[in-house]
Amino acid sequence: MSIHDQWKPVALVKDISPDTGTLRIVVNEEAVCLYKVEGAVFATQDKCPHGNASLADGYLENGTIECPLHQGVFDIATGKPLCPPVTTDIKVYEIKIDVDTILIRTDPK
């Protein structure tokens, strides 16, 4: 089995903050942010490529995350930047839910 076929349990769905909708975790020594939006769970890299801020500290709204440092906004499903000053995509990770456990694919999409 290659690393591309591996899924790693990383958290429980209930661990994602109901207040912020985010949770910072570390997977294979890389910070990852989990998001919960209307019952769906998403995962991206946690570090904003523009200002190195933690996206888990950002503002989640309508499937987007706003960096808390410079207010750049990313689509959490695609990783695409939506407004300046951010211009670089963020990594998006495939996840699946097994009962209440969040599993993340160990390689980003």
Image (cartoon, rainbow, N blue to C red):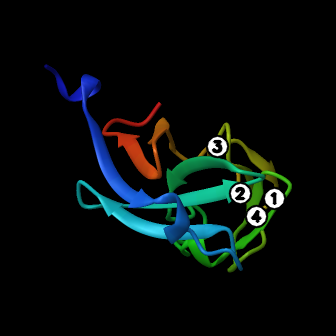
- Residue 17: x and y in percent read 61, 75
Q: Nearer the viewer, residue 18 or 56?
A: 18
Circle 4/circle 2 CB separation < 8 Å: yes
Mark 3 or mark 2: name the one nearer the start of the chain.
3
User: In the image, what residue type sits under mark 1?
Assistant: Pro
Residue at the far top in the pictured view: 1
The residue beneath circle 1 is 84
Relative side of 35 to 7, left or right: right
| Label 2, label 1: how far apart the Cα atoms are | 5 Å
The residue carrying pointer 1 sits among few (fewer than 14), some (14 to 19) or many (20 or more) residues within 10 Å by Cα, namely: few
Mark 4 or mark 3: name the one nearer the start of the chain.
4
The numbered dot on residue 79 is 3
In the displayed structure, 14 sits above or below 103; it is below
Circle 4/circle 1 CB separation < 8 Å: yes
Circle 2/circle 1 CB separation < 8 Å: yes
Q: Nearer the viewer, residue 72 or 2?
A: 2
User: In the image, what residue type sits under mark 2?
Assistant: Val
The numbered dot on residue 86 is 2
Mark 4 or mark 1: name the one nearer the start of the chain.
4
> Which SS class for mark 3?
loop
The residue beneath circle 4 is 72
